[in-house]
Amino acid sequence: MSTSMHVKLLLKKYRITPKKSWSQYFLISQFVIHEMASYARGVVLEIGPGLGFITQELAKRAGKVITIEKDKKMVNILENEYTFDNVEIIKGDITEMDLPVFDRVISNIPYHISSQITFKLLEHEFELGVLSYQKEFAQRLVMPPSPQVSRLSVMAQMKADCELLRVISRKNFYPVPKTDCALVKLVPHPKIAADTFFDNVVTGLYSHKRKTVRNALLSSVDLTGVTRERLKTIQIPYTERRVWSLTLEEICTLVDVLRHEVVT
């Protein structure tokens, strides 16, 4: 039986209509499912397991799989259609709960809360993540300095090495979403320690990313705490550069200079 047919039979059996508002688009490509599962090691976290097709493959390779599922009907499917001996099923909303300890996270995550999930994950220690995102979101995650770069790109790359593994045609999902998707590998790194001040400066800068650094900072004094008068007198690096052109290292240098002004 094809995966597509299996999806339709399960949905009919359990009288389920996929909720687009919950991003219930089920991955039906066995090729992509096996590629994702090939990264499974140790304790694997899966967010939004849905009908269990990825879960089933993860369970064959991981020491343990912890799934978090919000939809009680999906939980029923996981509990009734499969016989797992190394899968823990947690019913709950990923955005409202503490995460368990895990080694890797492998998921076709709900697209409407991609940003929330990604940054929540990156607040925790883990080895590696392989996540399916909407294509546009994935491209923003891995984007180098350019006029299209966003705060999302910078903050994600501050916390992890982000690599786009492959684009996945929308035809590989049921129901078919409006856009193609993409598989991204995240490898967290401790290179840069971000804090609230760091986040505020980045937010201020990238709210005005097409401005020069100087003008962006002058427009963001409420976030940085450095007054306009002080900004006009201190030596700030990269003042005439456009914000979007800054590298991660240059952003860190800029934040350190501003932090010194706030402390003193």
Image (cartoon, rainbow, N blue to C red):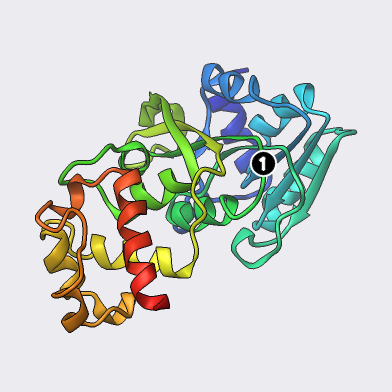
Which residue shows up at 23% across the image and 41% down it?
A: 145
Which residue shows up at 27% across the image and 37% down it?
A: 144
Q: Position of residue 181 (x, y in %)?
A: 38, 34
Report the front residue among 173 and 191. Answer: 191
Q: Position of residue 126 (x, y in %)?
A: 67, 41
Q: Secondary structure at mark 1?
A: loop
Residues packed near mark 1 inside 10 Å, few (<14), some (14 to 19) or many (20 plus): some
Report the front residue among 11 and 135. Answer: 135
Which residue shows up at 47% across the image and 69% down it?
A: 196
In the picture shown, does residue 57 fall above or below 128? above
In the picture shown, does residue 238 fall above or below 7? below
Which image quarter is the N terminus in? top right
On screen, residue 171 versus residue 113, left or right, reads left
Residue 20 can be seen, yes or no: no
On screen, residue 236 versus residue 11, left or right, reads left
Q: Position of residue 98 (x, y in %)?
A: 71, 62
Determine the image quadrant of residue 256. Answer: bottom left
In the picture shown, does residue 87 fall above or below 155? above
Q: Position of residue 184 (x, y in %)?
A: 46, 32
Residue reaching furthest right? 85
Which image quarter is the C terminus in? bottom left
In the picture shown, does residue 170 fall above or below 255? above
Report the front residue among 253 and 224. Answer: 253
- Amino acid, disc 1: Phe
On screen, residue 2 versus residue 250, left or right, reads right
Q: Label 1: which residue?
A: 126
Determine the image quadrant of residue 263. Answer: bottom left
Which residue shows up at 56% across the image and 44% down it?
A: 190
On screen, residue 213 versus residue 192, left or right, reads left
